[in-house]
Image (tube, rainbow, N blue to C red):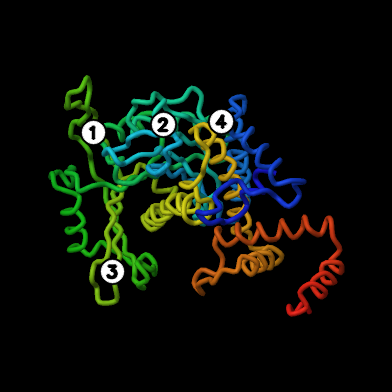
Amino acid sequence: MLVKAHCRATSSLAAGVGHAAHAQAAWAATQAAWRFFNNQRVALGALIEPLREAGRRALADDCQRPDAPACALLVHDWSKIDYGSHASKKDVVQLTHETDIGYELTNALLVSAADGSPLAPMEMHLKTQDGLLSTRHPAPPADEHRLEQILDTMQSSQDWELPVPLVHIIDREADSVGHYREWHAAGHRFLVRGDDRIVRWNERRMPLSEIAKQLAEQGQFHRSRAVEIRGQKATQYAAETEVVLDQPARQVRDGRKQSIPGPPLTLRLIVARVLDDEGKLLAEWLLLTNVPAEWADSDRIALWYYWRWRIESFFKLLKSGGQQLEHWLQEKAAAIFRRLLVASMACVVAWRLERQTAPEAEELKQILVKLSGRQMKRSRPVTASALLAGLCVLLSFQALLDNYHIEDIQRLLSRVMPQLDTA
C-alpha cells in the first residue's frame, strides 16, 4: 500500500504521504504510514532487499537477450538533501559551510549494460548529525571519507547473487591512484572519469590531455555515434590507448598528507570527444578503466560512462521530478530513510514499465502519459515521472471502480454537473 501511495509525481505543496483510494480513511492511512516510517524494528536491510531482488530479476532478463552483456553497471554517486529551512529536523548535518544544512545521500544504482536502463538502487547510506544510516550491516564509520566506502560496497556486492559481474562507474571525484590500486588488487572492475593527471605513456610522462592531443594528431579517433548535447546535435568520436599509473598515492593519514608508493598499474585510457558539425570540440571525457577489451570496446566504454547520468536522473526523480524528497515532513533521518527506500520501490515500478517494449506495455505507457496530463517532447514521449503521475490517477480510478459502477458515476455527473460533457 505504501509503494502504491508513492506511485505518483507530486508537487512540493503536497509532499506528504498520499493515501491510495483503497484506504478507508485518509487519516488512518497517514497514521499507519507515520508508525511504519518511525518503527525502529523495520530494518533498513530488509527494505533494500526487494530493490535488490528487482535488480536480480532485471539482470536475469538481460541474460536472455541475444546480445546479452558480459556484465552490469553499478553507478556510485552522492547527493545533498537540502533541509536548511526545516527547523523541526534536529539531526541534520552541516555538509560544507554553515548554511549548507541537510543530509548526504550515497547511492549505488544498478544500470543495464545492454541498454542503459536504470534497474534498482542496490545500496544507500544517509549521513546525519548522529552518524551514518545504511542498508549495509554494519554501517560504514560516520567519519569515513566517501571514497573509502566504495571498496566495501564493491566487496558487499559480491553477496548480492547477481548473475553477471559488475563494472563500477564513478565520476571524477574517484580519480585516485591509491583507490585504483586497491580496487584492482581486490579484483573489481571500474570505470572512472579522470582528471588531467600525469601518467606514463610510450615510456614518457605526460598529462592525459596531452595524450589526447597526440592521439588526435595521429588520426587515432574514429566516429562512434551521433549524440545530442545541450539540445544540439553532434557526433562522438573515441580513441584508445594504454597508460601506466606509477606515481605514489596521495592520502591523508593521521591528519597529514603522505605519499604512499605502490606497484605500477596499467589501465585503458579511452578519450571520448563530442564535436559539432563544424568540428568544434564541445566536450571531452578522459576515461580510465581496467575493464577487459573482450567485455567492451572503446565505443561501448564511452557509452557506459554516458549512462552514468542515470543516477542524476534518479536523484531528480526523488527530488523535483517526482517524489519531492526535500519537502518531506518526517522529523527524523531514520523515518526519512525508510520512506526513501519505499519511494525508490515506486521508481523501480516506473522503470520496469518504461523498459518494456511489448505492444501491451506501449499501449499502457501511452494511457499513463495521457492520464498524467503532461506535455511530452517528441524526442522523449515517455518519462518515469510521467508514468508515476499517470499511475497515481489509474490506481485511484481502479479503486474507485471497486466501489462504484461507471454508470452510477456518469449519472451523478449528468445530474449534479450537467455542464460537463461526459460522453
- Is residue 41 shown left or right of residue 117? right
Q: Residue 275 carries which label?
A: 3
Report the quarter where the C terminus lies.
bottom right
- Is residue 317 shown left or right of residue 406? left
Q: What residue sits right under mark 4 in the picture? A: 44
Label 1 or label 2, whichever comes before in sequence order? 2
Towards the viewer: 155 or 239: 155
Judged by depth in the image, the label closer to the viewer, 3 or 1, is 3
- Residue 236: give x, y in percent of width and height: 34, 65
Check the image and name the residue furthest to the front: 416
Report the quarter where the N terminus lies.
top right
Mark 4 near mark 1, Cβ–Cβ under 8 Å? no
Q: What residue type is labelled 2?
A: Thr
> What secondary structure is marked by label 2?
strand
Label 3 to label 4: alpha-carbon separation? 45 Å
> What secondary structure is marked by label 4?
helix
Q: What residue type is labelled 3?
A: Leu
The local crowd at label 1, few if under 14, some if 14 to 19, many if 20 or more residues have their Cα within 10 Å, is some
Q: Which mark is residue 128?
A: 2
* Residue in the image at 72% along x and 57% along y: 396
* Residue in the image at 29% along x and 55% along y: 285
Q: Residue 264 carries which label?
A: 1
Label 2 or label 3, whichever comes before in sequence order? 2
The local crowd at label 4, few if under 14, some if 14 to 19, many if 20 or more residues have their Cα within 10 Å, is many
Judged by depth in the image, the label closer to the viewer, 4 or 1, is 4
- Is residue 124 shown left or right of residue 267? right
Label 3 or label 1, whichever comes before in sequence order? 1
